[in-house]
Each structure stands twice: as C-alpha cells, then as structure tokens.
Image (cartoon, rainbow, N blue to C red):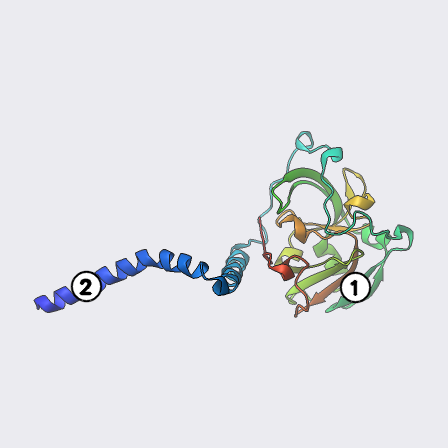
Amino acid sequence: MNSLVDNRKFKSINRRELLKLAPVVALGAFAIPKLQKPLLKIGLGFSDWASSKLFRSGHLAPTFADSELTPFSKFPINDYDVDDPQVDVDRWTLTVSGAVQKPGEYTLAQIQALPQVRQNTRHVCVEGWDVIGRFGGVRLSDFLKMIGADTTARFVTVECADDYYESLDMATAMHPQSLLCYEMYDEPLTRQHGAPLRLTLPTKIGYKQAKYLTDLKVTHVLEKVGYWEDQGYSYFYGL
C-alpha cells in the first residue's frame, strides 16, 4: 500500500517538475538556430487560429468624437513601395472575380451608389504608432451583397496598383465597420492615402488595410496570403 502511495506521489512530483521545466525547454529550443523559424511559425499559426476563434462579427471597434480626431495633416502616409502609383482615377475600375454572381468591372460611381458610412476609428500601425481618423465609404458587406458574393467562401482577396496584395477572412469582410473607403475627413481620398479606393478595417492592423485597390476576388482557396504575411507576419492580426 505504501509503495502505491509513494508511486503516485512520485508521479505527481514528476508532473509538477515537468511543467516547471517546460518553459526552460522551450527557451532552450529557441536557442537552436535551426528550430527558431519553425517554432515561430507554429506559434504564429496558433495565435492566428486562436484570434480567429475569438473574433466576434457583431463586436464593434471603438468610435470617437470629431474633437478627438488626429488632424489630417498629421495622419502619417505609409506605404511599402511608392506614395503614388499614378492611378488614372478618371478611368479606374475595380475588377471583381471569383465566387460571385456578377463578376466584371465596377466604377467608383457604382460603388458610391451604395449607402454611405462615415466613421471615426483608430488606425493602428504595426510600426508602433496609431491615429484616429475619419473615414467614409461603403460597407464591404454591402458591396459583396451587390455582386452576389458567395459568403460561404472563406476569403476575400484584393490586389493593388502598387503591386501590394492582401486577403481577409470572410467574417472580417462582412464586419459592419469594414469599409471600401473613398473618403477621409469628408473629402475624396488623396493619392497618398490610396485614391481612389482602399480598405478601412478598424478591427485589423494597418497593413491589412490595402490602398489603391484594383482587383477583388471571393475565393475558397488562397494562392497568396498577403504581402507582409508571406514574409512571416501575422495573417489574422485582430485588434
């Protein structure tokens, strides 16, 4: 009998000691160069998976009063390549393809015919800064409805005039604050801020909010994830 109790006590102690050692073992693994990238990739994948499960499609990002806005002149201009890819705004169209009933070319006027939404929301950059801006446009969900998108598809992808590209999970695309944005501060988008059309996603980090949109696709399979994600950044990155 005593030996059975001692055995259980030994196993209990071993489990506790193993739990204590687990962080040490993990840190030790990270110290091995060959294991660093695979471990980081696994950790990032788990973080994205967990974040997507916690995402609530009806939960709104904070909105702010006009008095709290960052002055437009102090709203940073951020890009990955050029400030102005020289889009011909007068001839611009958004090419729609994939799992939709009405593929084709959509003009800015057609997009602007949908109900307009204006919202004061925070824009958060992965570089560490954030600002509160005023954005105007149409709900991405309204546009998806207009084109007859299959909302059981998993993703919405976009490509841009500056060769940037990005993808959204469908829940984020359907979120009521996710906008196809054509205005900032009640004025048409400037070229530096993504004219004539960009994404505004207050539930996401800044690099998900692609500018200079040229193509939109609804799809079940991702060929490319996103410019920064394909270099190791988080895919979901919810706020």
Q: Marks 2 and 1, how far apart in space?
A: 64 Å
Residue 163 in the image, given as x and y percentages of width and height = 77, 59
Q: Quadrant of the N terminus?
A: bottom left
Residue 31 in the image, given as x and y percentages of width and height = 44, 58
> Closer to the N terminus: mark 2 or mark 1?
2
Q: Looking at the image, which residue sits at the far left?
A: 1
From the viewer's perspective, tell me whether residue 96 is left or right of residue 70: right
Q: Which mark is residue 96?
A: 1
Residue 79 in the image, given as x and y percentages of width and height = 73, 48
Answer whether residue 149 is visible to the viewer in this image. no
Q: Amino acid at mark 2?
A: Phe
Name which quarter of the figure residue 28 lies in: bottom left
In the foreground, 72 or 27? 27
User: Do the numbered discs 2 and 1 sit on residues whose CB atoms are within 8 Å?
Assistant: no
* Residue occupying image coordinates x 86% and y 51%: 86
Helix, strand or loop under label 1 = strand
Q: Is residue 3 above or below residue 128?
A: below
Q: Is residue 12 above or below residue 124?
A: below
Task: Count residues near mark 1 (Cα–Cα under 10 Å), then give few for <14, some for 14-19, many for 20+.
Answer: many
Q: Looking at the image, which residue sits at the far right?
A: 90
The label nearer to you, 2 versus 1, is 2
Give the mark count: 2
From the viewer's perspective, tell me whether residue 191 is left or right of residue 36: right
Helix, strand or loop under label 2 = helix
Residue 181 in the image, given as x and y percentages of width and height = 75, 48
From the viewer's perspective, tell me whether residue 169 is left or right of residue 109: left
* Residue occupying image coordinates x 24% and y 62%: 14
Pointer 2: what residue? 10
Q: Amino acid at mark 1?
A: Val
